[in-house]
Amino acid sequence: MASERANGDRQRLVPGLASGSMARVLAPIAIGVLMVAGWEAMCRIWEIPWYILPAPSDIARSMVKDWHILFPALVNTLRVTFLALTVAVVGGVSLAVLFASSRWVELSLFPYAVILQVTPIVAIAPLIIIYVPNLTVALLICAWIVAFFPILSNTTIGLNSADHNLLNLMQLYGASRLQVLWHLRLPTALPYFLGGLRISGGLALIGAIVAEFVAGSAGEGSGLAFRILEAGYRLEIPRMFASLVLISASGIVIFLVFTLITHLALRSWHESAVKREN
């Protein structure tokens, strides 16, 4: 009992956090702190002007000073990102179910989804912004195009990965298509869909930023990309970096949230998330 308790103490150095989890959290934080400290020291020792490379302390001051400008822009960018992601999820899953129901529909439409994916968004965003009069809708379409394909592709693969023996068994017992979809295909496709969702979350943010760069719009609906352009024109370099920090932080938070959702959804039954004994 004593050795088991000692072993448990070694594995759980902090209550509620195992040693493996601590290393996973603390190692990247330590690297980040060292990098920021080195950046700050380099700017101070070599006296690099703030308009060439601002120190992290300059960026932090700009973040606080310009928060009343940056926060509304962050909200606008995230609004477009999550609207596009929602439309991508609804459209991607619906189309994937249609593909799984009919091989002819999949063969007819999937190549067009591939064409949409491989066409660079930077090339078609100007056309979308010209032809769509509403700027918010144009930004939404651009972000949706980038986020749509991973969900469609992954969910289609997942729906088609259902065990053929179980499919035959359900058909033998007279299960309807809806019952097969609900009880077999959708649970099989869930890990694939969640994997696509994690990819699409970051891509939707990238699509929104690229569309904002192309639109270059000012006013109440402007996002972080326009704030970067505006700060560049005014040589407000610390504000440019502050905007970049917000974009990167948003992408990290989106990825972590979807990773947590994936873990919670799969940890009790799927091999990819079940905790192993050895």
Image (spheres, rainbow, N blue to C red):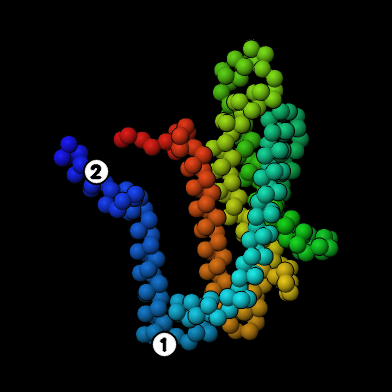
Vertical placement of residue 41 versus 31, above or below: below
Q: CA distance from mark 2 to mark 1?
A: 50 Å
- Left or right, residue 214 beside residue 10: right
SS for tag 1? loop
* Residue 188 in picture, x, y percent from top left: 56, 30
- What quarter of the picture does the N terminus occupy? top left
Nearest the viewer among 63 and 107 is 63
Residue type pointed to by label 1 = Glu
Q: Residue 274 shows which numbered tag?
A: none
Residue name at image x 70 percent, y 19 percent: 176
* Residue 115 in picture, x, y percent from top left: 71, 47
* Residue 3 in picture, x, y percent from top left: 16, 40
- Left or right, residue 38 beside residue 137: left
Residue position marked by numbered label 1 in the rendering: 47
Q: Residues within 10 Å of mark 2 (few under 14, many from 20)?
A: few
- What quarter of the picture does the C terminus occupy? top left
The quarter of the displayed image where residue 189 is located? top right
Vertical placement of residue 192 versus 72, above or below: above
Choose mark 2 or mark 1, whichever is in front: 2
**Residue 210 is at least partly visible in this image:** no
Vertical placement of residue 2 versus 201, above or below: above
Q: Are marks 2 and 1 in contact (CB under 8 Å)?
A: no
Q: Residue 8 shows which numbered tag?
A: 2
SS for tag 2? helix
Q: Residues within 10 Å of mark 1 (few under 14, many from 20)?
A: few
